[in-house]
Amino acid sequence: MATQPKREPRTEPARATEGMLYEQVAQKLHEQVTNGVYRQGERVPSVRRLSDQLEVSISTVIEAYRRLESQGVLEARPQSGYYVRARLWQPPAQPEISKPPCSPTSVSVSALALKVLRASREPDVLQLGVAVPHTSLLPIKQLNGILARIARRDAGRGGGGYDFPPGSPELRRQIARRALDAGCTLSPEDIVTTSGCQEALSLCLRAVAKSGDTVAIESPAFYGTLQTIEQLRMKAIEIPTCPRRGISIEALELALDRWKVKACMLVPNFSNPTGALMPEERKKRLVQLLAEREVPLIEDDIYGDLSHRAPRPKAAKSYDRKGLVMLCSSFSKTLAPGYRVGWVVPGRWREQIEHLKYINTMATATLPQLAIAEFLERGGYDHYLRKVRAQYAQGVERMTHAVSRYFPDGSRVTQPTGGFVLWVELPKQVDALELHRRALARKILIAPGGLFSPKQAYRHCIRLTCAVPWDERLDRALVTLGRLAEELT
């Protein structure tokens, strides 16, 4: 009998790509099911056969099949294999494009935001209302180990002095290297480190606008952006936004024709709270439109690295030819929220940003910057991203599935392809603020929709965070939320 040739042993680089491979295998098989290659009730190839066909490891195929099983595409039958489910689960409909009043308005969300944030500090409350990953999903142990080694190795640099603006050269060099993934060619001198993305956004807005000026935003919009506009006593003009494709460029153009807009503050990649991803051609058109009118774009790209599928989407900054796009981000959603390390590419406002940074907080903490720089340089960030992207994709899928099972009929849910938040539109009778109060009484924190509008609109919507470990407590909490929402209808 002929012997089968032995497979070459897998090298470390091959093993490092497993995390991306299983997503590709799952997507390929999902497409075959969708296209009718494998029909409902039919058996798909065995794990070993698909492993041979695609020349990937058995563990990769097993992980891909488990992913499709969690999505409701496949079902495992004991001692038989995997089969296409007889009835494929369909996610709920998505919300329609928003229709906010398109005129400048003052902002009033800080009091409500403070109330929600206070509840987020309670240790016995299930945190579904703040967009912060659970600590078990973050590489805190590795980062803290690096930080401790740096402190012992270089006591003088590690904490005894200031990293005055523009900040740590080691970290800025690593950020510049990674910027190519987002389509941007940067040098370390283009970058200023900040105390989180929130400070970066605030510094940019202060550099280009003043009290009373009007800023164009998405609708719904991240409440941190709204709080910054409110604190600086500016006005916001809400632009209709699609939960899949981002803001309406056409509506923005009309607003620019009618009103004197000093800046735009947008999240083109996986917007918070809807998770919308602006297509590349629309990002390019957005940058061109604003460049024609010399209106700066303050781009929040904090979720850009958290795409559920490769490749990473480009930043709008990649289309900037006039220095009008101010790119802001941080490592708070990916590595360590408590380290408070962010950064900004200020474009033509670099000197103003450095000065504002100095008078605002003088410097970003040195040790966290150095720890993150070393983590990036060693390749730890890429390895971690491969793992956590899959975890967030699975969390979004499971949460969506739970909403479809437990929430009232007629509920709509976004379908983000990156990040870890869901925007849920409940039946109009449901008062999200009352739902928030009743849920909190049962130790469940959600974010009511009013947080994401200058005048607290979206009163029947909520945002849920999916970056939490899935367990029985979480499932019970979603059952409870669905029951409370049903009562409010």
Image (cartoon, rainbow, N blue to C red):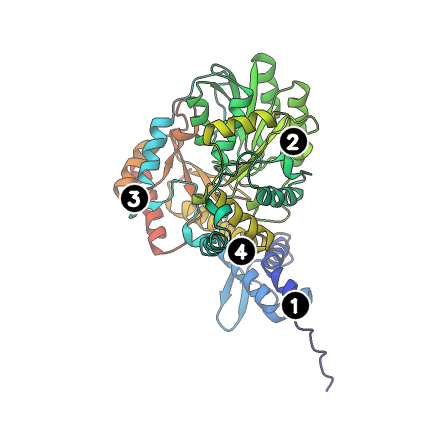
Query: The residue under label 2 is which amino acid type?
Result: Arg
Find residue 375 and report its horizontal and vertical position in percent: 55, 52
Q: Is residue 190 left or right of residue 437?
A: right
Of callouts 2 and 4, which one flags the residue occurring earlier in the amino acid sequence?
2
Quadrant into which the N terminus falls = bottom right
Of callouts 1 and 2, which one flags the residue occurring earlier in the amino acid sequence?
1
Q: Are marks 1 and 2 in contact (CB under 8 Å)?
A: no
Q: Residue at x 53, y 58 (%)?
A: 67
Q: Is residue 46 visible?
A: no
Find residue 478 and report its horizontal and vertical position in percent: 36, 47
The span from disc 2 to disc 4 (Cα, nearest Å) is 30 Å
* Residue to which mark 4 is pinned: 387
Of callouts 3 and 4, which one flags the residue occurring earlier in the amino acid sequence?
3
Quadrant into which the C terminus falls = top left
Q: Secondary structure at mark 4?
A: helix
Find residue 171 and report its horizontal and vertical position in percent: 57, 44
Of callouts 4 and 1, which one flags the residue occurring earlier in the amino acid sequence?
1
Of callouts 2 and 3, which one flags the residue occurring earlier in the amino acid sequence?
3
Query: The residue under label 3 is which amino acid type?
Result: Glu
Q: Is residue 341 visible?
A: yes
Which numbered disc, 4 or 1, marks the residue closer to the eye? 1
* Residue to which mark 1 is pinned: 11
Q: Nearer the viewer, residue 380 or 393?
A: 380
Query: The residue under label 4 is which amino acid type?
Result: Lys
How many residues crowd around disc 3 within 10 Å: few (fewer than 14), some, or many (20 or more)? few
* Residue to which mark 2 is pinned: 282
The span from disc 1 to disc 2 (Cα, nearest Å) is 41 Å
Disc number for residue 122: 3
Q: Are marks 2 and 4 in contact (CB under 8 Å)?
A: no
How many residues crowd around disc 4 within 10 Å: few (fewer than 14), some, or many (20 or more)? some
The span from disc 2 to disc 3 (Cα, nearest Å) is 41 Å
